[in-house]
């Protein structure tokens, strides 16, 4: 028996090589491994289910624990090396009966309390192997530590996410999600598990691909994300007297995914990331934020964090014309915007939903062509942008008659239709050539420097074309789309591309490791937008999180300021009707953009925290903090609260000399006071619906004196 222990970037990890050569992951935590009683069974490093192989007696129900190949994997060797990111541990294992080799990889990142993990399978045998499930990360004993029973100390946070209600985290005790310890105490096992996942092309239509698990007695916590732009799955269940956590991409029983691994073939699972902290949700998100910045491709927009005007939300609503655009372009330039995006509708004179796919402008809307509008945007010192929805083709698009049937997803011999669109298959080289030509044409003819790429359908479980299963076709398509996206970014490294899927319905870090920018929601109500925006940094780095600011034509000054505060600690997507709004309100928009340009050098370094907790739709008070070494910005929203005073805990600066002031807006009333002993900011917002941004600045000792 051999034990491997390490402490890396604040994470303690312990593996054991058993006498029977099983590899066990005994411990993964920000707290040291102090257990005196060592588990003798289970704690598998990887779970793999192969078709036709017996499900072990201890595996019941729909759970993915104690898989046939997983428990038979035997240790061959392991490597412990360093690369450009940090330390990498790889375990090489082999299933002795079928000829399946497996590698479990753990990539650490220097200075980041987060590990990226994935599995690699290789068929070295002589027969095909059907893969039904493979974990990317498996950890047993997640409830260990402390004296209380799991139902008294363990809580799991689930990030509910859907159209116009994105990033709504809810915290549950184990019993509230059906996890009880009666079986645990008797060393029995359940026939079920808490399972959270997604099936289909909208990766975050019901949940973010994340979760958070905390031991309220010891303070140990895990935050994870699954990095796939399609189907994914995670579960918590019990086995051999302990609770386990499994993270994976698609599975057969949950997502219609099945892979035939032929002799000599390899399969790499969906990567996942796990942050281990000894503290709060905010601390965990901080570590995940650092990790997200490390894994994404670099882009100048992450540093420039430019101000974007988009003509859609509570503005033109996909009804553009040359005349309408000119007025908005003039106003956007006066406000200080740096990009101007023409959103939907530019390609059709009337109803456009089911005819998209050709991507040529409507001469009825633009008599002198779209180039006239693009040139006018540039003449005002802004970079022009366009809305596209490239992954679909309307059923009445003139392009449908010109392309082959294999351009589209198919199931049961029929092209998949959803909301009057076909889903394009990005594994098809002809589709790729058409998309490349479309992007090239729009950039070369119109000088477009920004694309908002939207995606407004859910194409379902996948496609049968050239695939072992519907889910296999979907995963292959997902990965092909990412390769295409990378090729576009390689050709046009300064091009800004916004990821939008009816707002935040593909808010995952398979996409966001490539896309510079994310639309966080299409919520039209500015008060609800505040709740979504406040939680958005849990899912997206602040410099990638685009938030609408869209004051209406009849907005009051307080409503205008509220809209601006929604976006100012992340990325401003300005819209609404600033061209016809009252002059005093227009000045508030202009002031907000000017203030943003003063703070935006900090945005790429912001670490988020939530002084009064994460927001829920309908909360009377909402707050989001963004921390740097010297400054903390606090966005505060009062949403019909009867009282106008709020105390905002900032415990990380407790006892520190701090200067507190209202950063935006300075023309509307507000009060704030720093309480050094308590480590909190008291704020007063007079209006029942209002919002402010306060700034806390650390003082040097001589300044404090």
Image (cartoon, helix red, strand yellow):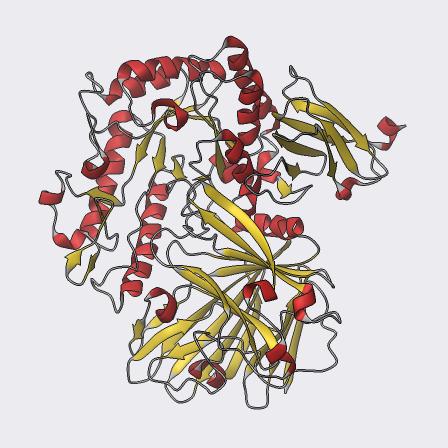
Q: Position of residue 40 (x, y in %)?
A: 63, 86
Which residue is most to the left? Answer: 401
- What is the quadrant of residue 365 in the picture? top left
Viewer-nearest residue: 401 or 291: 401
Which residue is most to the right? Answer: 705
Picture residue at 63% right of the left edge, 25% below the top: 688
- Give the quarter of the figure containing the N terminus: bottom right
Picture residue at 57% right of the left edge, 72% below the top: 244
Q: Position of residue 353 (x, y in %)?
A: 23, 36
> Do we see residue 511 in this rendering?
yes
> Do we see residue 357 in this rendering?
no
- Give the quarter of the figure containing the C terminus: top right
| Residue 20 shown left or right of residue 525 in the figure | right
Where is 256 relative to 44, above or below?
A: above
Q: Position of residue 328 (x, y in %)?
A: 38, 16
Q: Position of residue 138 (x, y in %)?
A: 53, 71
Picture residue at 50% right of the left edge, 84% below the top: 58
């Amino acid at each position: 028996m051999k034990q491997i222990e390490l402490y890396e970037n604040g994470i303690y990890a312990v593996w054991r090589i058993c006498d029977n050569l099983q590899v066990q992951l005994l411990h993964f935590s920000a707290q040291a491994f102090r257990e005196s009683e060592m588990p003798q069974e289970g704690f598998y490093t990887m779970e793999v289910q192969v078709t036709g192989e017996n499900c072990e007696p201890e595996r019941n129900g729909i759970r993915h624990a104690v898989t046939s190949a997983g428990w038979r994997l035997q240790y061959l060797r392991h490597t412990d090396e360093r690369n450009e990111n940090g330390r990498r541990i790889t375990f090489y294992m082999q299933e002795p009966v079928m000829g399946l080799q497996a590698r479990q990889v753990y990539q650490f990142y220097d200075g980041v309390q987060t590990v990226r993990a994935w599995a690699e399978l290789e068929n070295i045998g002589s027969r095909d192997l059907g893969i039904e499930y493979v974990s990317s990360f498996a950890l047993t004993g997640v409830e260990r530590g402390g004296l209380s029973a799991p139902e008294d100390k363990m809580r799991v946070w689930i990030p509910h996410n859907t159209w116009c209600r994105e990033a709504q985290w809810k915290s549950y005790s184990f019993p509230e999600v059906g996890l009880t310890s009666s079986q645990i105490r008797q060393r029995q096992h359940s026939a079920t598990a808490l399972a959270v996942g997604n099936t289909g092309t909208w990766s975050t239509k019901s949940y973010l691909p994340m979760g958070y698990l905390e031991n309220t007695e010891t303070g140990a916590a895990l935050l994870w994300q699954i990095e796939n732009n399609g189907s994914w799955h995670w579960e918590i269940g019990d086995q051999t007297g302990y609770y386990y956590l499994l993270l994976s991409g698609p599975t057969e029983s949950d997502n219609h995914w099945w892979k035939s691994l032929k002799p000599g073939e390899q399969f790499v699972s969906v990567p996942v990331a796990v942050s281990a902290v000894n503290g709060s949700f905010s601390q965990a998100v901080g570590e995940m934020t650092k990790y997200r910045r490390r894994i994404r491709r670099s882009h100048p927009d992450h540093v420039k964090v430019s101000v974007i005007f988009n003509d859609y939300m509570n503005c033109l609503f996909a009804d553009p014309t040359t005349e309408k655009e000119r007025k908005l372009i003039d106003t956007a330039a006066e406000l200080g915007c740096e990009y101007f995006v023409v959103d939907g509708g530019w390609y059709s004179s009337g109803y456009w939903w089911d005819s998209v796919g050709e991507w040529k402008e409507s001469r009825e809307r633009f008599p002198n062509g779209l180039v006239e509008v693009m040139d006018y945007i540039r003449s005002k010192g802004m970079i022009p942008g366009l809305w596209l929805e490239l992954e679909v083709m309307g059923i009445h698009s003139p392009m449908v008659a010109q392309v082959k049937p294999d351009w589209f997803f198919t199931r049961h011999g029929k092209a998949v239709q959803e909301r009057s669109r076909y889903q394009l298959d990005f594994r098809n080289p002809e589709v790729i050539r058409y998309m490349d030509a479309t992007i090239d044409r729009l950039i070369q003819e119109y000088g477009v420097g920004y694309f908002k790429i939207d995606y407004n359908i859910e194409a379902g479980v996948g496609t049968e074309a050239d695939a072992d299963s519907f889910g296999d076709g979907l995963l292959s398509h997902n990965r092909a789309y990412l390769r295409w996206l990378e090729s576009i970014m390689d050709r046009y490294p300064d091009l800004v591309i916004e990821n939008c899927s009816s707002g935040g319905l593909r808010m995952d870090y398979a996409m966001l490791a490539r896309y510079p920018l994310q639309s966080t929601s299409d919520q039209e109500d500015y008060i609800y937008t505040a709740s979504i925006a406040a939680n958005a940094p849990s899912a997206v780095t602040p410099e990638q999180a685009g938030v609408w600011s869209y004051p209406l034509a009849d907005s009051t000054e307080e409503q205008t300021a509220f809209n601006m505060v929604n976006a100012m600690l992340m990325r401003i997507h300005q819209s609404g009707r600033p061209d016809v709004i009252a002059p005093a309100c227009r000045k508030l928009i202009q002031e907000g953009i000017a203030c943003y340009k003063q703070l935006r050098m900090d945005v790429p370094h912001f670490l988020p925290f939530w002084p009064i907790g994460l927001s829920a739709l309908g909360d009377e008070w909402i707050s989001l903090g963004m921390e740097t070494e010297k400054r903390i910005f606090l966005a505060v929203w009062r949403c019909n609260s009867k009282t106008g005073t709020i105390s905002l805990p900032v415990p990380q600066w407790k006892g520190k000399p701090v200067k507190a002031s209202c950063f935006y807006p300075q023309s509307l009333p507000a009060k704030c006071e720093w309480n050094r002993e308590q480590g909190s900011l008291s704020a007063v917002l007079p209006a029942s619906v209002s919002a402010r941004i306060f700034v806390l600045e650390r003082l040097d000792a001589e300044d404090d004196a």
